[in-house]
């Protein structure tokens, strides 16, 4: 049973944790303009509250360690705004006395059997995603194809984010101009079942702020649920690669998919690495 003293100490630790994470993020990182002199390192409290969609007074009380309760929805919004990594995400929820964060539940979708499938299908690139385009798992073939995915911050491991905001990905995807409108349209179609969820709304908000193309296309309300079956890539070491796509769903109603990239021609098959270091 948690005592009043323990609860008070946990609230104070939560307050210090939130301040430390707020102070490490610059306005430029979240698309905010810099106006006048800033005495506060990183973001201001009111900026975090605005980006997370919570009241300024309420967020200030949270950072002051006051005895208030934060819902899971609010904590998720704060975690995304402060760009917490998986360990920080769990830490935030524990300090707030909340159940396990939903994003961590997503990550646990990758079972040992799925991990084995990822490895056994090498050297073919394979990626596991949810409907929001978050990368939940991938093998070494996928990293070879797209670059060092492990180096991408956890919160940015989203294929839509990378396709729109990562120049290296755009350089490798030969049909980017033709395919990206279809990718955005597919994302909008998938969002129909998640329109009220903060994680989806936050992703849209971010992409509208950081990607001019997304901001231009999103208001068109185009939808497309037909997946792209063939894609071409330009690998920096081996040149042109052409793959056919197979989408495997984990259950009739599951939104988790495993995408396998199989060579569309003999030239591509011959260029795949036989072993990985």
Image (cartoon, grey):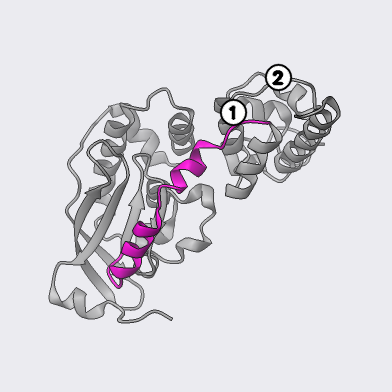
| Real-space CA distance between mark 2 and mark 1, rounded to the nearest whole angstrom | 12 Å
Q: Quadrant of the N terminus?
A: top right
144 on left or right of 267: right
Span of residues in magenta: 97-125
Residue at 45 percent across and 29 percent down: it is 201
Residue tagged 2: 58
Mark toward the start of the polypeptide (2 vs 1) = 1
Residue 263 shown in magenta: no
Residue 212 position within the rendered picture, expressed as x and y whole percent measured from the top left: 41, 40
Residue 254 position within the rendered picture, expressed as x and y whole percent measured from the top left: 29, 39
Q: Quadrant of residue 94?
A: top right
Secondary structure under tag 1 reads: helix
Q: In the displayed structure, would residue 148 be above or below residue 65?
A: below
Residue 100 shown in magenta: yes
Res 31 visible: no
Residue at 24 percent across and 71 percent down: it is 240
Secondary structure under tag 2 reads: helix
Residue 180 position within the rendered picture, expressed as x and y whole percent measured from the top left: 29, 46
Residue tagged 1: 52
Task: Mark 2: give few (<14), some (14-19) or many (20+) Cα within 10 Å.
Answer: some
Residue at 40 percent across and 58 percent down: it is 112
59 on left or right of 77: right
Q: Quadrant of residue 143?
A: bottom left
């Amino acid at each position: 049973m948690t005592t009043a003293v323990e609860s008070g100490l946990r609230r104070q630790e939560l307050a210090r944790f939130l301040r430390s994470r707020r102070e490490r993020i610059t306005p430029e990182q979240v698309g905010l303009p810099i106006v006048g002199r800033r005495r506060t390192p990183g973001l201001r409290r009111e900026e975090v509250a605005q980006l997370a969609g919570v009241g300024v007074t309420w967020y200030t009380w949270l950072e002051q360690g006051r005895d208030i309760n934060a819902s899971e929805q609010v904590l998720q919004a704060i975690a995304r705004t402060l760009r917490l990594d998986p360990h920080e995400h769990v830490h935030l929820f524990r300090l707030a006395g909340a159940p396990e964060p939903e994003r961590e539940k997503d990550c646990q979708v990758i079972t040992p059997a799925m991990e084995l499938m990822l490895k056994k299908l090498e050297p073919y690139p394979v990626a596991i995603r949810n409907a929001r385009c978050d990368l939940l798992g991938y093998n070494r073939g996928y990293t070879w194809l797209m670059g060092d995915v492990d180096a991408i911050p956890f919160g940015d491991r989203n294929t839509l984010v990378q396709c729109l905001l990562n120049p290296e990905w755009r350089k490798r995807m030969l049909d980017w101009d033709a395919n990206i409108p279809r990718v955005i349209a597919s994302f909008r179609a998938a969002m129909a079942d998640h329109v009220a969820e903060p994680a989806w709304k936050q992703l849209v908000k971010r992409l509208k702020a950081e990607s001019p193309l997304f901001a231009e296309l999103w208001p068109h309300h185009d939808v497309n649920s037909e997946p792209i079956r063939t894609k071409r890539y330009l690998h920096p070491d081996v040149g042109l690669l052409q793959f056919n796509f197979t989408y495997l769903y984990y259950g009739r109603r599951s939104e988790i998919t495993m995408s396998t990239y199989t060579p569309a021609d003999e030239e591509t098959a011959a260029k795949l690495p036989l072993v990985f270091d």
